[in-house]
Image (spheres, coloured by chain):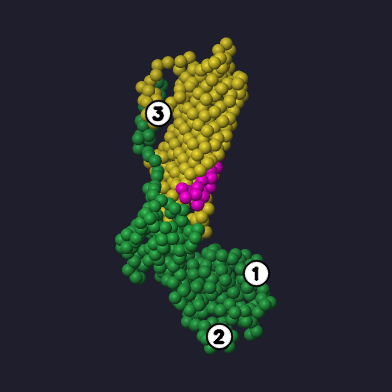
Chain colours: A green, B yellow
Amino acid sequence: MRESIINRWGRRLAALIAAVLCLSSCVDEETYPDTPQGNLEALWKIIDEHYCFFDYKQQEYGLDWNAVWQKYSVRTSDRMSSEQLFEVLTGMLGELRDGHVNLSTAFDYGRYWNWHEDYPANFSDSLQRRYLGTDYKIASGLRYTILDDNIGYIYYGSFQSGIGDGNLDEVISHLMLCRGLILDIRNNGGGNMTYAEKLAARFCQERTLVGYIRHKTGMGHSEFSEMEEQWLEPARGMRWHKPVVVLTNRSVFSAANEFVKYMKCMPLAKVVGDRTGGGAGLPFSSTLPNGWTVRFSACPMYDRNRQNTEFGIDPDHFVALSSADFDKSKDSLIEFARKVLME
Amino acid sequence: MRISNSLLLMLLALCLRLPLLAQTDSRMLPVQAESRPPLPQTDSVRLRTTATLLGVGGTNLLDTYLSQEKFSGLGLTFLSSTALEKSYARWSTVMQHEANFSLTTDRSENAKELQGDYSFFWGRLRAWHFFGDRLRLQAGGMLRANVGFVYNTVNSNNPAQARLSLMVMPAGAATYRFRLFGQAWAAHYELQLPLAGLMFSPNYGQSYYEIFSRGNYDHNIVPTTFVSAPTFRQQAYIDWQANRRIALRVGYLGHYQQSEVNQLKTHTYGHRVMIGVVIKK
């Protein structure tokens, strides 16, 4: 009896092992040759399977990635140099019109920067020095001072520079007697989104819905998850309870664009300046057969109205740097912000 | 002892894919000299055999969440294996600790990927003895718990992948004890096959920021089968018995960790030359 039970289970085990050996196989990925054509195919496929704005950009300006393939696949040859191949690949990537799409090589950095190069800068560091002076304070990535009309002024140039809770407590504490605050993020090209959230939380008085995020769930252009809500919690440290004006220009991009998205949800905040540069796709990276690295937008983010902010966020007040003000050593945006805060 | 049909079928299945070195298992039972009388069956002795090995060899990595390219390089492995049993018992308990670390590059040698992982195996194996106890076959099951990482040195918001999995694995072993040049030798082969388990994986284009900073779960704990996670492991060793308690072991360890879940493909193939000692207590 016991022997027959063992034999029965032994047969089942043997059948299971045979099934495992027959049905399982190697998990592998297609390998492209390290030739100009191979690198072009690999790059086109990476973007085709991972880029997150195809549907949106097809609506905005008729982007057709298959048509892009037809256009660029005839431009490679085995005799072309690395520089020539770089030109073809960056040209193809430029069709995406995305500042988060880049090609890194040892000799150059492929980019699409029209989103700010085609527009006025609306920022002058020489003008800024007239307001900051030389005795401004520095708290990690923040430079701050009090202007002569008791308006606080903070400049945050890059979200790649970290800020800590202690820094923010000290800065807000120093500025707490000011009647208003100017938060200047012009030329802030982004960085770490965690710092953008940390700073915005200092202006948030209650749990606030600030936008949505989603991700791709497959290789298809339209395969996405549900939109997940982005909520901002008030910071536990010192918070700012008075009016604040955020200054923007076209170079405000990526995490800085996200920061503007958050601040647009704060009741006491106003945005002054130019439309931001956008960059609402969290970028991922991959590598080509020749070792070049490609960066691309992978996870789209939306404002609280579920609108795509990839091409930027409009300010509450459009203000440009005027040459008349420049001649008087006045920054038009800062002066306008002061008037708003005085109201 | 008559070999049943089921055992013949199992042997055949093993032979289809992998070489079978049928030799006695000096690791599982104490190696006894020809003249030493066997222990009385009424006195059950608890036996503990521990093998400690270090290995070096090649590693091949693929993780399409990080890159479409495959990375290859050199890897190190530490393996500690303990078998617990009572003399003349049919069942033994096996525990293994395996740690791996690899440094790999892509074919352009521009990007690097670092890989590290730790696996704990626990299993129960039943033994059958043949040819005057020289050949011992074992079969049973093991539970594998694995934690690890892969880190890509050039990526931006997807620089790394975490590995976390649990898997039930049917296991088998064959050992053969023999004498050569007047010395006592033993050869051992061991195999673990995939069956079913659970693993962590981000969804296809989901960032770790979204999973851990925003707390957005999306199919991140995934049930696996031998189709979606065909992970195999095999070991083949030769033991030279230095004395009754200690043996020198040299051989091969191959681990083939693979998965295709959430439309993400991963594989970690490791081939190691292993060397170490086996101690019986």
What residue is rendered at 61% in x and 23% in y? B246
Most foreground residue, A215 or A295: A295
Q: Which mark is residue B14?
A: 3
Quadrant housing the N terminus of chain A: top left
Which chain hosts label 3?
A: B
How far apart are labels 3 and 1 at the CA level?
Answer: 66 Å
Q: Secondary structure at mark 2?
A: helix
Please give left or right for residue A16 compared with residue A243 in the image: left
Q: Is the residue A30 above or below the residue A327 in the image?
A: above
How far apart are labels 1 and 2 at the CA level?
Answer: 28 Å
Q: Are marks 2 and 3 on the same chain?
A: no
Tag 2: amino acid: Phe
Q: Is residue B40 visible?
A: no
Q: Are marks 1 and 2 in contact (CB under 8 Å)?
A: no
Q: Quickly name the residue at label 1.
A: A139
Residue B201 is covered by the magenta coloring: no
Tag 1: amino acid: Ala
The answer to which of marks 1 and 2 sits earlier in the sequence is 1
Q: Is the residue A32 above or below the residue A279 in the image?
A: above
What residue is rendered at 52% in x and 83% in y? A321
Please give left or right for residue B14 compared with residue A194 in the image: left
Q: Secondary structure at mark 3?
A: helix
Most foreground residue, A190 or B201: A190
What residue is rendered at 42% in x and 15% in y? B1
Magenta-highlighted residues: B97-115
Residue A145 position, x and y percent, is: 65, 77
